[in-house]
Image (cartoon, grey):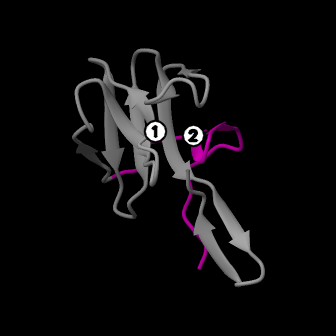
Amino acid sequence: MKQKTTQSTNVILHGEAMIFSSTLPKGAKKIKTSNEEYHIIADSETTGNHHVVDCGEKVEFYMDEDGRMFMVNEEPTQVRCVHANRHDAIPLTTGTWEFGIQEETDHFAQHVRKVQD
């Protein structure tokens, strides 16, 4: 099955988080942020060092019917880790962004899984 995509070919990598310049799909629904300070875009399974995007008055997050997450930001923001010493913060210019998680293949088990912290 071919996966739908609205992603550009340019990607920002922040740990296992992938960020693409994108367009907001029709029918995408606005979602609540993780808290007032930031929204988690890649959950840390072991250390609590989530990959997050800083919130702002003009930063909104959406989910489409396939569970893909998007952000529309009319003000600059950044992607960073909760614990600043893990990854550098990367600025995100105004626009529409789509978030994803890198995958890895275990060729011995013939299994594809999401990359984990």
Q: Looking at the rendering, which quadrant does residue 39 occupy?
A: top left
| Residue 43 percent across, percent down from the top left | 43, 49
The percent coordinates of residue 28 (x first, y second) are 32, 50
Give the CA separation, mark 1 to mark 2. 18 Å
Q: Mark 1 or 2 closer to N-term?
A: 2
Q: Decide: is 71 above or below 103.
A: above
Query: Magenta part mainly helix, strand or loop?
Result: loop
User: What residue is at 59 percent from the left and 40 percent from the top?
Assistant: 20
Is 76 positioned to the left or the right of 55 in the image?
right
Q: Residues within 10 Å of mark 2 (few under 14, many from 20)?
A: many
Q: Label for residue 67?
A: none
For the point 30% across and 53% down, the residue is 27
Q: Is residue 28 left or right of residue 105?
A: left
Identify the amino acid type marked 1.
Answer: Asn
Q: Nearer the viewer, residue 40 or 65?
A: 40
Position in image of residue 2 (x %, y %): 61, 73
- In front of the other: 111 or 64: 111
Front label number (1 vs 2): 1
Q: Secondary structure at mark 2?
A: strand
Q: Position of residue 99 (x, y in %)?
A: 50, 45
Report the residue marked by disc 1.
49
Quarter of the image where the N terminus is located: bottom right
Residue extent of the magenta highlight: 1-26
Q: Secondary structure at mark 1?
A: loop
Q: Nearer the viewer, residue 113 or 117?
A: 117
Q: What's the mark number on residue 19?
A: 2
Write the residue at 45% across / 48% down: 44
Q: Which residue type does callout 2 highlight?
A: Ile
Asked if residue 27 is positioned above or below residue 9 in the image, the reply reads below
Residue 25 belongs to magenta span: yes
Graded by Cα atoms within 10 Å as few (under 14), some (14 to 19) or many (20 or more), the crowding at tag 1 reads many
Was residue 13 drawn as part of the magenta stretch in this picture? yes
